[in-house]
Image: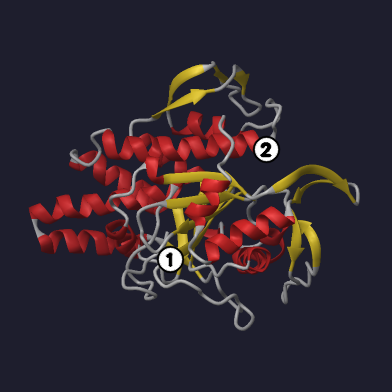
Amino acid sequence: MPPGRSGPTYRGGRPRPRWGRIFLVSGVVLLVLALIGAGGAYTYYQNLNNDVRRTDAFAGITGGRPAKTVDGALNILMLGSDSRDPENADKPGNARTDTLIVAHIPASHDKAYLISMPRDLYVPIPKDPKSGQGGGKAKINAAFAWGGIPLVVRTVEGYTGLRLDHVVLIDFGGFTSVVDALGGVDLNIEQDVKSIHQPFRQFKKGVMHLDGAAALDYARQRKQFPEGDFARMRHQQELMKAIMDKAVSGGTLSNPMKLNSFLKAATKAVTVDQDLSPVDLALQFRNIRSQDLTFSVSPHQGSKIINGEDVVVPDETKAKGLYEAIKNDKAGEWFAANPPPAK
């Protein structure tokens, strides 16, 4: 989620898709609190901003970055960390990034396009100056292990040709508290499945009401589904939508205690770049709803064994078309001509 409100000045507004929707909702909250007392609301939200963990996501990245093409449009890199130590979740080797999403918000600021990049996507990874690793093609999630967030930024920018404005790292452990603060969410389970993680929950086909731990558990399952990791990405997207809808319609905004719990949990669950302002982001995108989101997967040709590894091969031609469209703020036109497959 990013800040940035006036044109290319990125201090005041951004997109807030999926997990980022969390901050979108806080914008509405700000308006509610303003009715109680503008001074108190401002102080409260400044404290929320100050409580968010920050990281130098663009450390050591100087020349050679893609130019920003369209003023007002935003590109946010969203990462999901499996770290059990949120204080160090952004450090190389401390976590895995099984979730990698490029969120694009057009200059109109009325929609959001979220492109999941498979963790096994086989792409060029620049050489990291500190670890000395990289410098060739590998699975995209190796970039985080080799060089932390800065190397992931360089990798994604190099592959897509997009300039990333902000980075949001979501800690899955803390994320369960966000769902619990909402009173749980309803998810449509697509098939009977038993979790491979303790306590080995049994998920039944149909709509189930899940607490934070169960919702996250389901969104992590992949081996039991024919589509494997692609099913996992789809379930994560469904969970993002469920969170957004519940935050807006579940009475959270009208209940001060629930609202405070939700915002505190969201603050603890994320690490953001140095310049991102969750409050500004929330205000800018407070009117976006789940129906305004388009989820897709970075174009690919499926899995293939390369150098003994099972990797996901990019569809270079289609991917170039998608990212060129995003770069020129024409994502809507591209998705109209290439709609994501229905499931």
Give the labeled residue for mark 2: 229
Question: Residue 207, position in %: x, y?
Answer: 45, 20
Locate the C terminus by quadrant.
top right
Q: Tell me the quarter of the picture where residue 301 sits.
A: top right
Determine whether, in the image, residue 342 is placed left or right of residue 124.
left
Give the labeled residue for mark 1: 73
How many badges with numbers are in the image? 2
Q: Tell me if residue 331 can be seen.
A: yes
The kind of secondary structure element at disc 2 is helix
The mark lying in front, picked from 2 and 1, is 1
Which amino acid type is marked by label 2?
Asp
Q: Tell me the quarter of the picture where residue 339 sits.
A: top right
Picture disc at residue 44: none
Question: Residue 304, position in %: x, y?
Answer: 84, 44
Question: Residue 315, position in %: x, y?
Answer: 73, 51
Which amino acid type is marked by label 1?
Ala
Locate the N terminus by quadrant.
bottom left
- Crowding at mark 1 (Cα within 10 Å: few <14, some 14-19, many 20+): many
- Crowding at mark 2 (Cα within 10 Å: few <14, some 14-19, many 20+): some
Q: Tell me if residue 84 can be seen.
A: no
Which residue is depicted at the point 38% across and 35% down?
Answer: 180
The kind of secondary structure element at disc 1 is loop
Q: Nearer the viewer, residue 120 or 324?
A: 324
Per the model, the C-alpha gap separating discs 2 and 1 is: 30 Å
Which residue is depicted at the point 39% across and 52% down?
Answer: 111
